[in-house]
């Protein structure tokens, strides 16, 4: 919001950019955008995985579908809700101070609804004869192939199961390996989102960067867990897959949330220090500031007026008193464009 901070002396006002410069939408509109975006994302990942047998079970089609569709969803409705589409992203952005705590639970609910709706669509269109062609007993068993799992239910274990027929042992990932991988890939993903959507970032194509990162992380985690990174996506598969998927779902809720939290804490720990206004500034406009501009740690050159704006003769900031300087210094780290934001 443009804040009029003109002093009583009549000097020109200074426009200060704040979070309110970004168009604000009502809660219903934001939740609808989150549900839509999560629907699109899960449709790309779970939808492609449902019929991935025709692609010999390769991960590349799934990763491309998920990455490309998240680009489109962020570009379409990111400016409305922030384009999270993932409870772990919402949690990370909230911990990083980029989203409101009051929106956390409603966003999570909208994401679960959107993801489950996408899974329902894919489950309903599976031909009755298709499960038998893939060796599955029924639709639910087929849909378990889209779920996230570890141990004997990891993709690598499935691919190496034939080794047991020759006396070998399938390669299985332990619960700790699955937990570690999901935490790391989610932390990287959320960290990239926090970085490229920061106000200080020079990236002008954040949705593309986010989409490509998601696709790459799906490829990395796929052999271990079938690549979750998103509790809403895991929940959607478990609802219709049933069976063993419910017993392992907890990991794909906990690990992504921990990864999002680690990314947020890392981001806050290494983010530049906010601009610090001069401590000894008089409350009345026109107070003498001695030698001129205050010293401060700059994270945003717009946070305080430039040195050239100081009236050398009067020794005062143009139309900005001490309280307003503090307000400017607290300028929030709002992301730009239509990428995920608070």
Image: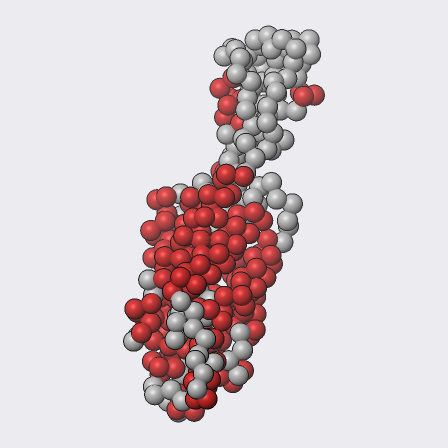
Tell me if residue 291 comes above or below residue 182 in the rendering.
above
Q: Can residue 338 be seen here?
A: no
Q: Nearer the viewer, residue 176 or 27?
A: 176
Q: Measuring from the top left, give residue 19's x and y in whole percent.
A: 50, 38
Q: Measuring from the top left, give residue 63's x and y in whole percent.
A: 54, 69
Give the colouring mode of the picture: secondary structure
Q: Nearer the viewer, residue 68 or 6?
A: 68
Q: Measuring from the top left, give residue 303's x and y in whole percent.
A: 58, 29
Q: Can residue 313 be seen here?
A: yes
Residue at x 60%, y 58% (from the top left corner): 208
Residue at x 59%, y 61% (from the top left corner): 212
Residue at x 59%, y 8% (from the top left corner): 288
Residue at x 54%, y 65% (from the top left corner): 220
Q: Nearer the viewer, residue 169 or 138?
A: 169
Picture quadrant of residue 248: bottom left
Q: Measuring from the top left, give residue 82's x and y in whole percent.
A: 48, 51
> How many numbered discs?
0
Q: Nearer the viewer, residue 169 or 284?
A: 169
Tell me if residue 179 comes above or below residue 304 in the rendering.
below
The reply, left or right, for residue 19 in relation to residue 142 is right
């Amino acid at each position: 919001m443009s804040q009029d901070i003109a002093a009583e002396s009549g000097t020109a006002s200074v426009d200060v950019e704040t979070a309110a410069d970004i168009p604000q939408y009502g809660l219903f509109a934001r939740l609808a955008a989150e549900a839509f975006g999560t629907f699109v994302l899960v449709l790309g990942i779970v939808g492609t995985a449902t019929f991935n047998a025709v692609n010999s079970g390769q991960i590349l089609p799934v990763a491309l579908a998920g990455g490309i569709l998240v680009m489109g969803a962020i570009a379409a409705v990111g400016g409305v809700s922030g384009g999270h589409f993932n409870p772990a992203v919402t949690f990370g952005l909230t911990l990083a101070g980029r989203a409101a705590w009051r929106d956390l639970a409603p966003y999570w609910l909208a994401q679960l609804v959107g993801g489950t709706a996408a899974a329902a669509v894919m489950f309903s269109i599976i031909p009755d004869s298709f499960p038998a062609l893939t060796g599955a007993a029924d639709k639910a068993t087929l849909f378990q192939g889209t779920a996230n799992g570890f141990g004997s239910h990891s993709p690598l274990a499935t691919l190496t199961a034939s080794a047991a027929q020759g006396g070998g042992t399938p390669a299985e990932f332990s619960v700790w390996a699955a937990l570690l991988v999901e935490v790391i890939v989610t932390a990287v993903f959320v960290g990239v989102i926090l970085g490229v959507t920061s106000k200080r970032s020079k990236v002008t194509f954040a949705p593309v960067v986010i989409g490509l990162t998601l696709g790459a992380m799906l490829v990395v985690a796929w052999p271990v867990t079938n690549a979750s990174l998103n509790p809403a996506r895991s929940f959607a598969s478990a609802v219709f897959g049933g069976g063993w998927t419910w017993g392992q779902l907890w990991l794909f809720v906990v690990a992504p949330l921990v990864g999002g939290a680690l990314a947020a804490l890392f981001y806050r720990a290494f983010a530049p220090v906010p601009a610090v206004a001069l401590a000894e500034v008089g409350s009345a406009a026109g107070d003498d500031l001695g030698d001129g501009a205050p010293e401060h740690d700059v994270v945003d050159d717009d946070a305080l007026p430039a040195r050239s704006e100081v009236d050398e003769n009067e020794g005062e900031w143009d139309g900005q008193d001490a309280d307003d300087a503090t307000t400017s210094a607290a300028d929030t780290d709002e992301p730009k464009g239509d990428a995920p934001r608070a």
